[in-house]
Amino acid sequence: MTHEFYNQKIGSLFGFTDDIKSNKIGFSVNAGNITILWNRNKIAVEVKVDDMAFQLFPNQLMTTTYLQYISYDKTVLPLTAFLFNREFYCISDHDSEVSCNGILFFGTQDLPIITIPKGQERKFNTLYEVFEDEFATPDQIQGDMLQMLLKRLIIICTRLAKEQLIIKKLDNDQIDVVRKFNVLVDIHYKTKRKVSDYAELLFKSPKTLSNLFALYNQKSPQQIILDRLALEAKRLLQFTEKQNQEIAYELGFNDPAHFSGFFKKITDFSPTRYREKQAI
């Protein structure tokens, strides 16, 4: 079962399928989409994001963006997916409504995977049915209704992510700083490499950020910046034909040798060896 709402005038898309592996290229827009994956099976399924394999257990959800490379080659069971593009619902423009940016989407931390608690399974299944019902009612306000339902889904998932992925020591203001830092790194990592750069954008001191992330996880803000840079380098090496020199300049390195040294320090492989290893 696959449904799609598509406004050709503005290029806005919202898609809904019970089998994303079979239907991933069957939508009117197949680039620039954000996806919410939901394992509604009784056993785990595997999804590969960039160069990492993830097990998605029953009643778990995973969010991915168009910046990532998703493979369903080893996904053996149907996997439910909701997908939408910026023209349908811009999470940056609506951040004050859903507060998901930097937690569910466009974060620099580990891939967000959330588990639906037993007590909330009925809520998610009901929302699933309402999505189905709305696609059975095509009219002039269908797009608005689907946007409202998507917003509800994002809010519910964001609440669970805050409960399950962020430690209880952080208050809402601290969580906002964490997620805004994540988003800023995702935007500026090619040109801003120092914690002080982001501290200035957030009107915080570098020490405040360091202390906050010491509570949040084991990575320092500086390590998060470097890891994001390394992640993009891995993507370009593995999924494009670009030469090492091109990648170095694209990532803001003035000297390809500096890029090679940075990459080897982070991954223990030279860029060339890493590409060869991934090809094998």
Image: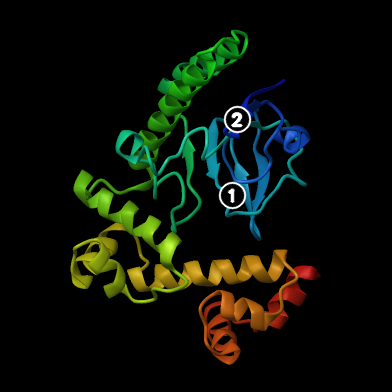
The mark that comes first in sequence, 2 or 1, is 2
What element does badge 2 sit on?
loop
Q: Which residue lies furthest to the front in this view?
A: 9
Q: Residues within 10 Å of mark 1 (few under 14, many from 20)?
A: some
Would residue 62 appear left or right of 90 to someone viewing this image?
A: right
Would residue 206 appear left or right of 276 to someone viewing this image?
A: left
Q: Residue 9 carries which label?
A: 2
Q: Residue 15 location, x and y as percent?
A: 62, 28
Residue bearing mark 1: 66
Q: In which quarter of the image is the C terminus?
A: bottom right
Would residue 170 appear left or right of 2 to someone viewing this image?
A: left
Q: Residue 89 location, x and y as percent?
A: 47, 34
Tell me which residue sits at (74%, 69%) in the image: 278
Tell me which residue sits at (44%, 60%) in the image: 186
Can residue 148 be seen?
Answer: yes
Q: Depth check: 89 or 238 in front?
A: 89
Q: What residue type is labelled 2?
A: Lys
Q: Depth check: 207 or 141 in front?
A: 141
Q: Which quarter of the figure has residue 34? A: top right
Tell me which residue sits at (47%, 39%) in the image: 114
